[in-house]
Image: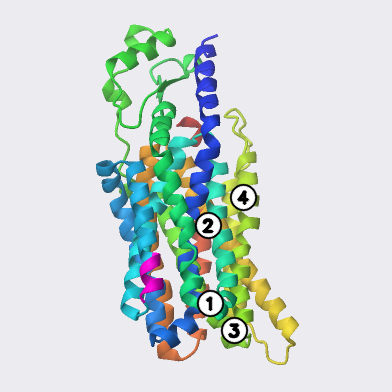
Amino acid sequence: MPNTTTKKTHQSAQSATLPSLFFICLAIVLLAFNMRSPIVLLGSIAPLLEQDLSIGQVQIGWLGAIPMVMFSVGALLSARFSRYFGLYNLLPMMIAMMILGIVLRSVLVSWGWFFLGTLLLSLAIGFLNTLAMPAIKGLAPQRIPLVTGLYSLTMTITAGLVAGIIVPISEQVGWQWGAGGWVVISVLALFIWLKLRPMLKLHINQTQSVTIVKADLPQADKQQVVERKTATESIDSDSISSANTTNNSPNKNSLNKNSLNKQSPSIWKTSMAWYLAIFLGIQSLMYYTVASFLPSIWADKGLSLVESGQMAMVFQLMSPIAITSLTFLMNRQPKNKQNKNKKDYARVIAMISSMLIALGSAGMLLANFTGLSSTAMLAWASLWTMCIGLGTSGVFTLSIMLMSLRTHNAVQAGELSGMSQAVGYAIAIAGPLGMGWLLEVSGSFRLPLIILTILMVINVGFAWLASRAVMIDGKEIDGK
């Protein structure tokens, strides 16, 4: 019974994670609360900002594009800063920067301060976007779909609620309080992460593991030996000897540092990483363009300001349905390696989600409310908005799950997360900025909506490529 010791060790490691799971989930929820809402609320209060800050559609486009730039910059820099400061030191630092940005643009009412505040909080979110993935991979390796789903669900639910109620709140107390009052949640998140930082650091040291595969043994004798190591520890000769002793492996098959530390191809040189980055990038382009301009688009089609704001809420509140369904399906994915006929849920989800976005974009482009009642207008606008909301949430959540599921360890997950989000958000920059520019030039939403729809159809092809059942290095999942 060669696997008995390994299984017991793995089970004890799993049980050690249970007491901290609640606190990890609490920290993730509080972290995620303001990861999208400060950005998506801009679309709902855009008319108020234009009036109070004396700005036009071009500036609104810049406010929609700046987050993409900062997300990309944060993704590129996060790995280096994380190595220097440490993951759980950098997380509270970025939460503090996000708090500063929210306060600046809410308290000091001018275009310059609003722009600076948006820049700072977007840069902080850019770091946090990337840091969350290796944190989930390291802290909850057996619960990646669950914790990732909770993270994504919290972001989208809070973004939807804020987008939907920001206009009524702003009408009562002003957009400054409406946009800035949510900083209280970020302050609480900072407090929780500071309190949990020592425990979480110890926790990840206890649960981080290195999987050693004895590739030189005959197929019948191959098995995995789990050695509990810290994320920063190197694999020394003692741990290698222990692994060999546990598995009664012959001396000729002894493992060494070189075989264990064999370098994988650079993330930047792998086709799967690029497919995932472009897939995420086109989705993000659509998401942030819609987040910035959806109320204006539907207002241009004939809806009132309040009804247009409600469409922003509908767009965001489709996420719980998409994320819950996706998480359920991914948790149901057969994990038995001997099952050769197992279903590939990732590909199914990718294709359906990308097709929904294309359908919703086409519907929004072709919508004509002439002669329709107010109820019919709302029904059609809700339908196309729901398609886009379901699709974008499905693509985003699947993409961040794949960053963990298609990598071999937390370090590789962090590298893929940084690369794909840096490239993805660099692509997404063109969305809000291009929409604002084309709107100024053409005076209509028709041309930018045509371009968006074409891009969404193209992304269906990248959905097929990015969801292939292989690891990031091209190896079959069963052979990792």
Q: Which of labels 4 and 3 is toward the front?
A: 3
Residue drawn at the location 61% of the way across and 33% of the way down: 340
The earlier-in-sequence mark between 1 and 2 is 2
Quadrant placement of the N terminus: top right
Q: Magenta region: which residues?
A: 102-108
Q: CA distance from mark 3 to mark 2?
A: 24 Å
- Label 2 belongs to which residue? 155
- Give amino acid for label 1: Val
Residue of label 3:
305
Q: Please provide percent x and percent y for residue 429.
A: 38, 69
Mark sitting on residue 326: 4
Secondary structure of the residue carrying numbered label 2: helix
- Left or right: 292, with 69 as reference point: right
Whether residue 67 is in magenta: the answer is no
Who comes first in sequence, dot 2 or dot 4?
A: 2
Who's the residue at 61% across and 71% down the image? 360
Amino acid type assigned to the residue bearing label 2 in the image: Met
Magenta portion: prevailing SS class: helix
Q: Is residue 180 above or below residue 13?
A: below
What label does residue 173 carry, if any?
1
Q: Is residue 472 visible?
A: no
**In the rendered structure, which disc, 4 or 3, sits on the residue that comes first in sequence?**
3
Q: Label 3 near label 1: C-beta < 8 Å?
A: no
What's the distance in space between the residues labelled 2 and 4, CA to CA?
Answer: 15 Å
Q: Quadrant of residue 8?
A: top right
Gap in angstroms between the C-alphas marked 1 and 2: 25 Å
Q: Mark 2 Cα within 10 Å, few/some/many (few <14, many 20+)?
A: many
As helix, strand or loop, the secondary structure at mark 3 comes to: helix
Report crowding for label 4: few under 14, some 14 to 19, many 20 or more residues within 10 A (C-alpha).
many
Q: Is residue 141 above or below residue 253?
A: below
